Image (cartoon, rainbow, N blue to C red):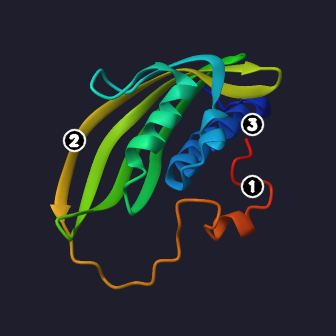
Amino acid sequence: MTGIPDIATLADKQAITEVIRTYCRAVDRLDIPLGQSIFHEDAHADYNQGFYQGPGKGVIEAICQSHHHLTSHSHQVTNILIEVDGDKAGSESYVFGTMRSEQDGKPMQIGVWGRYLDKWEKREGRWGIVHRMVVFEHDEMREVTPANQEARSTRDADDPSYQFLTSRKWGDA
């Protein structure tokens, strides 16, 4: 990186970062309209041949449908690198997803590590993904012993976060 980015570039990078985080919130809460809002209408998503390759907005429905049986879900993104060139950008975001399910009456934890590689365009003042490729690094599934913490989260509009983030009602893009 050479020099210090100007304020507009920093604002664009922050806006893109917020969209990446919005994706995590959307799939963790099974909020399909919110998840679809991160993609432009003509976007393409490549989550590997074995899961999903097709229109960007369609991957959100596929994820929510395939993850609906899970008891909990948590995505984190880190190491977000963004290169902005006018109204186009590219990004790489490391992701770790932790999910819980139950198999044969036993709590199981699924961990998935990977990266989101995204091409972005700013259209009518809004950054959206035009192409996403997911690169999976590794995953695991193991039986866990819960620590008996009271679960407050839900995977729908009843999640407490919707009371605190007033600008993001469930289903609102």
Residue lying furthest right: 124
Residue at 52% from the left image edge and 35% from the top image edge = 60
Q: CA distance from mark 3 to mark 2?
A: 33 Å
Nearest to N terminus: mark 3 or mark 2: 3
Label 2: which secondary element? strand
* Real-space Cα separation, disc 1 to disc 2, in angstroms: 34 Å
For badge 3, the amino acid type reads Ala
Which numbered marker is on residue 138? 2
Tell me if residue 39 can be seen.
yes
Please provide percent x and percent y for residue 95: 40, 44
Q: Mark number for residue 11?
A: 3
Amino acid of disc 2:
His
Number of residues whose C-alpha sits closer than 10 Å to that of mark 2, classed few (under 14), some (14–19) or many (20 or more): few
Dot 3 and dot 2 residues touching (CB under 8 Å): no
Q: Residue at x 19, y 51 (%)?
A: 140
Q: Residue at x 45, y 47 (%)?
A: 78
**Residue 128 screen position, x and y as percent:** 66, 26
The label on residue 160 is none
Q: Is residue 66 rendered to the left or right of residue 125?
A: left
